[in-house]
Image (cartoon, rainbow, N blue to C red):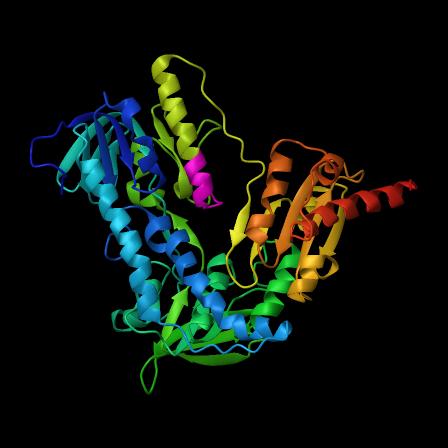
Amino acid sequence: MESSTGPRPDHVDLCIIGSGSGLSLIDDDINDWQIALVDNGVGPIHIFGGTCLNAGCIPSKMFAYPARYALAPTDARRVDVDVEFGGADFKAIQQRTFGRTDAVAEEGLAGLESRPNVQVLTGRATFVDERTIRVGQRQITADRIVIAAGSRPRMPEVPGFDEPYLQAFVHTSETIMRIEELPKKLVILGGGVEAVEFGHIFAGMGCQVSIITRSEPLLRHHDAEVASRVTEAMARRMVLRLNQQVTLLEPGDSGGVVLSTQDATGIEYTYEADAVLVCLGRIPNGDQLRIENAGLTPDPMGFVPVDQYQRTSVQHIWALGDVCSSHMLKHLANRQARVVKQNLLAERDGRPLQAKDERFLPQGVFGEPEVATVGLTEAELNAAGIEYLSYVHEYAWVAYGWALNDQEHCVKLISDPAAEQLLGAHIIGPQATSLIHPLVQAMTFNQRIEDIARAPYWIHPALTEVVENALLGLLKLAAERSGRQ
């Protein structure tokens, strides 16, 4: 389907594949370009606007925040207050969330369609050759092409998951938040960020949640200190089954489904569920575009390779976001979109291209507890043979931690042996995704730990003092090891 009733050109200056971060390329400074945007939508109902808006970052946080209130009685008891939790209105949360995000998607599409130089083609794009894109029965050619086609959930290759009569019980991030009825028993497959966040959400909504993962701990690619504490915290709220492999999905005797698993010793287990949520990672969508017809070859993980300018091996084809980056983070995709836009204009105007810098890329996990991280982990430094210092400062050691009566959370910092520069920062606990940002900035601008810790005023007794004291702890540790006082 095309966005205009009038004839549209079959040759354009720019073709963008995908309606997530790729949308930000379209603005008034390229109004003299004819632009085609091709989008197949997100999920089974093919919503315009990309994963973040419709099935990822934004709606999941609009669910995660109210789910946090399920823990209010526990938190309150810790500070000698009696609070009751009466339950969550799941339908109301759905309506508030998607009432907002669906409206944004609709307004975004309408805004694009109102631009006289933009045509929107709905459907799956495939390359015919390096300059030709097919969408349904339509073919267009383009001087420049930007692949911003995103990614999709990875499904298990396990008997039963491909059976049509069981599909109503199997969900991914693209469907679970729009589910008609809250399941009583939810089994989540996976142990990464999605599994942790959705585990928190649905436990908070009142579901009996079980997380099954084939490895341990949860968040195993994060720093070990953080991963261990997250796993312990999640185990207090739901059933965790680590080191188990799913072997079969089949109908239950009294409705729902039954999952069979096997552990490393060969012992078999079964789990009954009203719904199964698959959180086994995501697959970049380059394979669906037939990129080989354009002369592009995906890397071994399926990503479209790009250089430091976000350009592919074909001079006029660029890529951004999940389709070319294993990090699969919205804030990275947005930055890559800015790099692509600047380089498209630079190429047009005969200016040098701008290179990206992705060295200090933070990530947040909006579960309970919250997690934020930037830079390297101890495991990565050990594997690379790099010497370092690490220091852990507990929330319980600062005044606001006393106010919280916190006994579980911490800031872990990693530096070079002299504590000159930060190499990594890992935070678990309240406000983690906000507390990380002074450290992200410090690493980005190559600031010395001494300067970060001692030059600014840190508000007392704000929780930011846990970051300040972690920095001071690193300096003290370095001084002790070097024999200085």
Q: Left or right: where does residue 103 sit relative to residue 316?
A: left
Image height check: is 350 above or below 372?
A: above
Q: Quadrant of residue 187?
A: bottom left
**Does residue 50 appear in the picture of this structure?**
yes
Give residue 399's position: percent from left, percent from top: 71, 58
Q: Which residues are magenta?
A: 324-335
Q: Residue furthest top?
A: 350
- 159 displayed left or right of 44: right
Instruction: Tell which of 242 and 30 is nearer to you.
Output: 30
Q: Residue at x 68, y 53 (%)?
A: 461
The answer to which image quadrant residue 422 occupies is: top right
Relative to the observer, which residue lies in front, 343 or 395? 395
> Where is residue 480 drawn, in percent x and y?
88, 45
Quadrant in the rendering for residue 343: top left
**Quadrant into which the C terminus falls:** top right
Image position of 178 with respect to 25: above or below: below
Rendered position, 453 above or below 240? above
Q: In the rendered structure, does residue 437 fall within the stretch colored magenta?
A: no
Residue at position x 60%, y 66% in the image: 231
Q: Quadrant of the N terminus?
A: top left
**For the point 60% across and 63% down, which residue is it?**
230
Position in image of residue 347 (x %, y %): 37, 17
Tell whether position 325 is magenta.
yes
